[in-house]
Amino acid sequence: MASEISAKRKVLKTIKEYFIISIGVFLYCASWIAFVSSKGISGGALPGVATIVQFATGIPIAYTYFTINAGLLIVGTIVLGKGFGFKTVYSFLLASVLFRILPDIDWINNLSDIKEVFINAIIGGTIGAIGIALVFKNGGSTGGTDIVALIISKYREISPGKVFLYCDLIIIGSIIFLPGRGLQDVVYGYLQMVSFSFMVDALLTGNNQSVQLLIFSQKYSDIADAIVNRVHGGVTAVRSRGWYLKKESEVLIVIARKIQMDQITSVAKEIDPNVFISVTSAMNVYGNGFAQIKKKIRLKIMDI
């Protein structure tokens, strides 16, 4: 009886997560169509690439978005392993479908009658950020530059955040090479990127901040494998002994971004409903995937 109730709760929780992810993807795609691409703004990330291709060739955003994302998922699976999960695949497929059908819906196209392009850039970035935050909060991802960041950070000592920044700067800046486009189009794109990034950070309680998780469970091995393969996080196992039961076990130590915290705790809870997790804020974290240690600048003091 207890197992049946637990199974039902798990199913309901999964349905709820996919429902919220669907709302988030819809907000992201609708904001892009209504406030960004339809106003001549390129934006960043993979939709930005697809938008620039549409501006240059007339190929709809959906086709370019799906083709590149599918290719990145295949490469990511080969390089990083089968750890993306159904939520990522679902999110990117749903986004591909929405990018195809939303431009044909009149009320989406007429959602914004604001003439000022910079206001559309801010509104589009803000609403899109709300959508992506909902997706991230429920363990989803739209792929794209997320996969590029994971691949590059695996082989180079550079944080994913910097990869996102560099990709967006290059993508948005490339619109200046299209006929009839100028510096103002680049500025509008960067404005959308800034508003989007700021809002995502605010909604996810600062994704540049880090947390330390101590995970206590008898199923520590399964949880550690899931964090490495599904969340792509690092795990350290430390030998421990529970003083009350006098049982030997291992405590998992995980240093992660706050943006990954909900996903890690959900994965651990999924494997072991009785897991015990302690979360503390990490003031500073240095190393691969986080901030780099700055070399001290030595000042030579000359005697006068």
Image: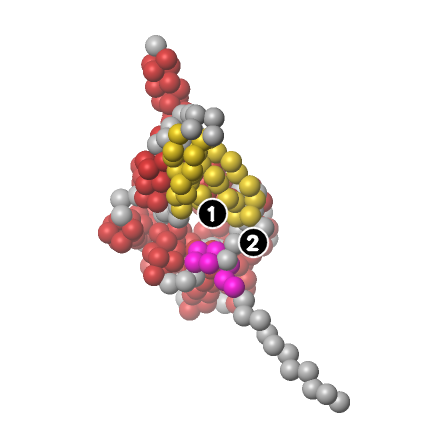
Instruction: Name the residue at 35% across, 57% down.
Output: 154
* Position above or below: 10 against 37: above
Residue pointed to by mark 2: 284
Local SS, label 2? loop
Task: Find residue 104 and report its horizontal and vertical position in percent.
Answer: 38, 40
**Quadrant location, the N terminus:** top left
What range of the chain is rendered magenta?
287-293
**Which kind of residue does numbered mark 1 sit on?**
Ile
Say if residue 269 shows up in the picture.
Answer: no
The quadrant where residue 174 appears: bottom left
Determine crowd level at label 2: few under 14, some 14-19, many 20+ residues with C-alpha closer than 10 A. few
* Position above or below: 142 against 185: above
Q: Main secondary structure of the magenta part?
A: loop
Residue pointed to by mark 1: 255
Task: Find residue 38 and report its horizontal and vertical position in percent.
Answer: 46, 50
* Position above or below: 302 against 213: below
Q: Which mark is residue 114?
A: none
The quadrant where residue 237 appears: top left
Task: Find residue 175 and report its horizontal and vertical position in percent.
Answer: 44, 64
**Quadrant location, the C terminus:** bottom right
Say if residue 153 shows up in the picture.
Answer: yes
Instruction: Name the residue at 42% across, 28% down.
Output: 246
Q: Nearer the viewer, residue 166 or 53?
A: 166
**Which kind of residue does numbered mark 2 sit on?**
Asn
Which of the marked residues, 2 or 1, is nearer the chain's N terminus? 1
How many tags in the picture? Answer: 2
